[in-house]
Amino acid sequence: MLGEDFVEKVDVEFYWKNRDSGDVEIGVLPQSLHPEGGTATGCYTWGGEASFGGSVVPVAALKFRSVDLQSPRNNQEHHTQEMGLKRLVVRRGQSFLLQLHFSRPFHFGTDYLTFVAETGPAPTELLGTRATFSLTQARQGNVWSASDFIIDTNSLFVSLFTPSNAVIGPYTLKIEISQGQGHSVTHPLGTFILLFNPWNAEDDVYLPSEILLQEYIMMDYGFVYKGHERFITSWPWNYGQFEEDIIDICFEILNKSLYFLENPSIDYSQRNDPVYVCRVVSAMINSNDDNGVLQGNWGEDYSRGVSPLEWNGSVAILRQWLARGRQPVKYGQCWVFAAVMCTVMRCLGVPTRVVSNFRSAHNMDRNLTVDTYYDQNAEMLPTQKRDKIWNFHVWNECWMIRKDLPPGYNGWQVLDPTPQQTSSGIFCCGPASVKAIREGEVHLPYDTPFVYAEVNADEVIWLFRDGQAQEILDHNTHSIGKEISTKMVGSAKRQNITSSYKYPEGSPEERSVFMKASQKMLGPGRASSPFLDLLGSRGSQDQPAQLQLHLARTPEWGQDLLLKLHALRVPDRVHPRGPIRLVVHFCAQALLHQGGTREPLWRQTVHLNLDFGEEIQWLLLLPYDNYRNKLTDEKLIRVSGIAKVEDMGRSMLVLKDISLEPPNLSIEVSKRAEVGKALRVHITLTNTLMTALSNCMMVLEGSGLIDGQISKNIGTLVAGHTIHIQLDLYPIKTGPRQLQVLISSNEIKEIKGYKDIFVAAARVSSAPPRPAPPRTLPTTPLPTLPEPSTLPTAPLFIP
């Protein structure tokens, strides 16, 4: 075999010159059968050989010219077009097309092509991070392959296939060209990114519903649910998983994990498993034991960063983490952790949703009870125990097959990136099968006992007197794990998914599962613990009166609060029909997100005389001045009452949690939105408080509508004033989009609104589009706005 560089003029019987390109080819077919025809002549400069009529005929060496990765076409077919069309992003278990350009037509059987795909720092075939595969006529099973090729003159269209269990990540792709037994020449073809493929039935994250895929993979905005079980707030969030740089940040997150730093090659080799990848991401979203994305802060001082309430979406957080040298972003709480993880997992191709659990138990001692303490004056007391009942807690569910579990536990899996406790020595949680949680199978990995307690623990409320807990005021078996919620598919409505986590409260199935779980968590040797002795109790003891607290009118932030106490005398064993005298001590405290309280802000004592069957209603006034400047950013108040029956020594508890809603933010847009065309946005805010809102900052965000964020200092908004703001946006992408607007002030951190917008393709026009506005508008603050009586009528316009 002559080398490629050997060149000589020889006589040959046939060769042809292409009419169009002028390229010359030696072949073994007579000219009459050659597909290109051409003009025969008698000599040729060659490099290579071919067999013809029993003799050796030289053939020109196949030389690589260029490659077209067909990114627009492939990305469209792989549902990654929203990530951009300039680079190749594909999903595993699905073919994608390449167009190779050579110096002459490719001859199968004479020319040999071998492809090499590599990922990770030290790729090897043994670890699954390197694949070598030759061009064949047909694909052979679920393996790396190049097949189903089409020859078009000097071009070769090749279909490359990645197996459904391939390692995800950025790949380099090379081609080796050889002829016969000769030496090969290697050429780089470029790079591509490989993701999980929930559209592929062979992938572990396969989700067999296009409607669900559009929601849990393709939807780049949504809602996080916060607040209180009876005052649930929809918090709009911009996930932004398809912003072009987010995919690179997601893999950078994986490359900064402790697992990668300990052994990069092994870490990469396990990135074919969604269970492993989800677990790594859960650890990396928080920063407790690594330089993860977010630093948590459950205090009230956010001066060194951003309040968790002031984030509009994940994109700004992820970009800040990257830009600041992979240092944790300040600050996050549970809903921020979960929303950022949702962005990362949807970007990587794992169906993911955000789930909120109201009255969520934090049960560190694994006994499935959480103790709460009140004193005789109805003040909720702090406790040194780590057990708490959070007002709400937010985590993620990811959809996947669990090959590491017995059959029946596939589907939604809980993952929680909020750093609450360690798992295998690292602050992460999950995946825990939702089905296993419902059935009390707390022995199944990962972290199922902890999640089970979050939705199923019992609450025991104690009266604390003389330095110790002396009386059980209530043993509540159904107060924890309420209104478990996620965004409804294809809708802005909230979906209650509590039944996915547990059987109906109080049902025989629910108590049976609870007993099973508690036995597994405590162990057979502790079956007679005091905790288990309580399990037969159903709420409070026999009481001579029923007490309830209600709101007498809708609570508004900045207004006096009016409550109504309902007291009804009922028969009991001690005084079945006689009158009783009650002394009721009331206390109001600011309620913290993690379940604790601040110092009392209001107290009142009421004396009641109740005859048998009598019902009394008593109004309670909580003045605004009492809670002004005393609430947390969550604006929650707990009013508690301890009623003492004279001459009986028995106590009763009554509770009412109050959520104060911020002023309403209104957003309106012009009727039609088009890519690149000015879209007028009207924003209206009325300050309904009795005090001014100072240092108001407005932030706008929305993937496909705005590149990054638009921010503006809008000064001070005096009490009773309405501000009108107008601005123009220039949409970037077509399809359904959501604009999120956040106005924060020193007094209220979370005045938030959203507007769903459908963006159409731009209509053909000869006029060039106007350039988009800068990400940050001029920062000069507006002057303090005048009192309502002197307000100008023209709206504020931000160019």
Image (cartoon, rainbow, N blue to C red):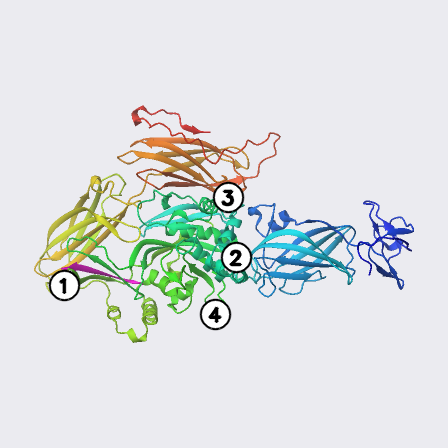
Residue flagged by tag 2: what amino acid is it?
A: Ser
Residue flagged by tag 1: what amino acid is it?
A: Asp
Query: What secondary structure is found at the residue carrying circle 2?
Result: loop
Q: Earlier in the sequence, mark 3 or mark 2?
A: 2
**Numbered circle sitting on residue 572:** 1
Mostly what secondary structure, the magenta segment? strand
Q: Mark 2 highlights which residue?
A: 209
Q: Earlier in the sequence, mark 1 or mark 3?
A: 1
Query: What secondary structure is found at the residue carrying circle 4?
Result: loop
Queried whether the magenta region covers residue 208, the answer comes back as: no
> Where does the image place residue 188, in percent across and percent down from the top left?
67, 52
What range of the chain is rendered magenta? 457-466
Residue 591 visible to the viewer:
yes
Gap in angstroms between the C-alphas marked 3 and 2: 20 Å
Q: Mark 3 highlights which residue?
A: 736
Q: Earlier in the sequence, mark 1 or mark 4?
A: 4
**Residue at the spot x=40%, y=44% of the render?**
311
> Where does the image place residue 338, in percent across and percent down from the top left?
41, 52
Gap in angstroms between the C-alphas marked 4 and 2: 21 Å
**On screen, residue 373 above or below 687:** below
Quarter of the view holding residue 367: bottom left
Q: Earlier in the sequence, mark 1 or mark 2?
A: 2
Residue flagged by tag 4: what amino acid is it?
A: Pro
**CB under 8 Å between callouts 1 and 4?**
no
Query: What secondary structure is found at the residue carrying circle 3?
Result: strand
Q: Mark 4 highlights which residue?
A: 407
